[in-house]
Image (cartoon, rainbow, N blue to C red):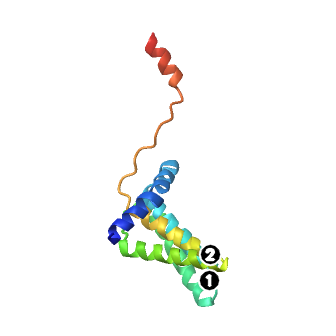
Amino acid sequence: MSFAKVDHWIGKTLFLPPIIKLCQLTRQSQFAVSRLFWFIAALDGLYRAETLFGSILWSGISLLMMVSAAWRADNPTASFMFFRLLAVAFLALDLLKGAATVEWAGFEFWLFVLVAEYAAIIRNIPPRERRHVDSLSTRGSASK
């Protein structure tokens, strides 16, 4: 199985359906959602920073992501399969570490990164499905 097929399966089954539903519910573009989750990932990195250098670095990244999310929310973004698969590998390693040591803190960062990256590859958001609330009124008008 090729890396492209693995990446396609992960995106299609795990990440794209909830991302599309989030875009439909919030009426935001997939690019705005991608930038939002990059901002959340940067804030998580800032929260988990343990050194002064790490705090300064993640503060700068957080500010950069905030400005990017505000000014360029709907501009198309790029995503690379290599980076997505690398993030999946780091998520798997963090989950294995969590299962072995019962220390789960930190794996959410990779989830945020993956949601941001998979949101960036969506090209079209399908329209939201309408509920059949007035099904009784349409039946009544059809019989008249």
Residue 48 spot, x, y in % from top left:
63, 79
Q: Residues within 10 Å of mark 1 (few under 14, many from 20)?
A: some
Q: Which mark is residue 99?
A: 2
- Badge 2 element: helix
Could you tell which of marks 2 and 1 lies nearer the N-terminus? 1
Residue 21 spot, x, y in % from top left:
49, 51
Q: Is residue 7 above or below residue 140?
A: below
Residue 69 spot, x, y in % from top left:
48, 66
How many circles with numbers are drawn on the protein? Answer: 2
Quarter holding the C terminus is top left
Residue kind at label 2, given as amino acid type = Ala
Q: Which mark is residue 49?
A: 1
Q: Is residue 101 left or right of residue 138?
A: right
Foreground pick, 62 / 14 = 14
Distance between the alpha carbons at the discs numbered 2 and 1: 22 Å
Residue kind at label 1, given as amino acid type = Ala
Residue 138 spot, x, y in % from top left:
47, 21
Q: Which mark is residue 106?
A: none
